[in-house]
Amino acid sequence: METMKAKKRWIWLIAAALILGVAAGARFGFFSLSIRNPMGESLEVVTLREQFGNMTPEQKQTALTEAIRSPNPSMRQEAIELMGEWRLKETVSLIEGAFADSFADTRMASLRVLPRLDPDRGARLLVSALQDHDRQVRRDAANQLKFRKDKRALPALVRALDDEDEITRIFVMGALHNITNYPIRIKASASPEVHQQAVQRWKRWWKTAKIDWQTEIAWVEKIKPVHPTHPDETPSLTIKMGDRSVMLGELKGKVVMLHFWGTWCHSCLNELNILKSIHEDYGNQPFALIGLAVEEEKDSKAFRKFCEEHQIRYPQAMVEDSVAKLFHARGIPTTILIDAEGNIRYRWEGERDGSTFRKAIDRLLMERS
């Protein structure tokens, strides 16, 4: 993910350091968070982190409970990270519940932290995550299981051999090898043919071996996928697109995808073909895709020319940083998916694949019907 207004980064950091003090600014966490979000929201997160160590146990619990309910998704993510760093086992229910958050980074934090604090509940969450719609979540779950060597997860790993993502399958085969010591391993550089041969060898092994894994099979079958169900309120916004203006509220009844991007952002350009395809494929559905271009208003002619040359047909609006800040976007690309009731249900920071987007869109369209 590429940050906005990079040229003002150091000015912002100096200002934040004056507010928080030189000692606070010297901390690694402060600078890393500020660089991620030069628009200012990281200040709220840094304040929580800086004050947290001086709080009593009761104050910590109160602060984290409030943070996990914050409308600022970065605060929710930070709350989970702090629970893990301070190994606050009394917060495991909050951590587990955060996997249903609308913000993908909060979900990933939950997936990392819970297994450390509660291995049993963490194992269940990792198995659930192998069935997730988000490719990044499935990859992380498979990679963690590779090192945790929890035998109960083996049937779920075998099932994940059919995952559409090659990297996830590589992690899955690594986890299977570490659990069973069966000599089937594969390198990321392997050809597609070698990759498929390894997958088939694991499936043949499972046909004869699964008779000895009935307890684990029964355990896995009880674990269902957990999808985002904790919505965020969508800010009021009037979007100016050429000669017309559209209020987000007017689109209620449709599933709406807002995509913050810029022509200067490499990761954004990688997503262009994915988004153009989504726009075409969902054209007859109650769905709207709107591009919100950041840092482009100074040369609108060049931006329009770029869209024409790249055949971008879905609506575009040039917006200021204040709009991105309104939606708590820490950088671009940031993609937000709003359901037919007008609530934010998905939020992704950084580049995503088309399948992740499409599965989320299909889920919200199905809810609508």
Image (spheres, rainbow, N blue to C red):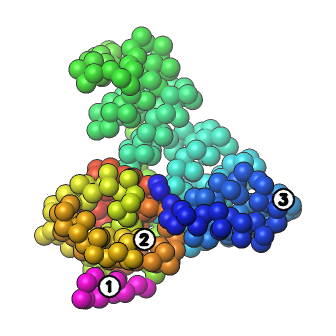
Give residue 317's quadrant in the image. bottom left
Q: Name the residue under label 1.
A: 240
Estimate the x, y position of residue 234 in percent, counting from the top left.
44, 78
**Which label's residue is closer to the chain start, 1 or 2?**
1
Disc nearer the start of the sequence (2/3) = 3
Q: Earlier in the sequence, mark 1 or mark 3?
A: 3
Give the SS element for disc 3. helix
Residue shown at 28% from the left, 21% from the top: 191
The residue stretch that appears in magenta: 236-248
Q: What percent of the width, then of the height, locates residue 21?
A: 82, 66
Q: Which residue is drawn at 43% across and 85% down?
A: 236
Residue on which the image places disc 2: 295
Report if residue 342 is visible in the image.
Answer: yes
**Would you name the residue on which mark 3 appears?**
23
Q: Is residue 64 visible?
A: no
In reply to whether residue 185 is colored magenta, the answer given is no
What whole-number distance in Å separates the C-alpha atoms at marks 1 and 3? 43 Å
Instruction: Name the spot of residue 52 as percent of width and height, x first.
Output: 79, 61
Judging depth in this view, the residue of 39 and 87 nearest the camera is 39
Name the residue type under label 1: Lys
Say few, some or many: other residues with alpha carbon within 10 Å of mark 2 (under 14 / 14 to 19 / 20 or more). some
Which residue corresponds to the image point at 82% horizontal and 62% vertical from the top-left?
A: 22
Kindly identify the amino acid type of the residue bearing the numbered disc 3: Ala
How far across and how far down the image is residue 69, in percent?
Answer: 61, 70
Density class for disc 3 (Cα within 10 Å; few <14, some 14-19, many ≥20) is few
Q: Which amino acid does label 2 sit on?
A: Glu
Majority secondary structure in the magenta region: strand
In the displayed structure image, the side of residue 180 where residue 88 appears, left or right: right
Nearest-to-viewer mark from 2 and 3: 2
Q: Is mark 1 on a helix, strand or loop?
A: strand
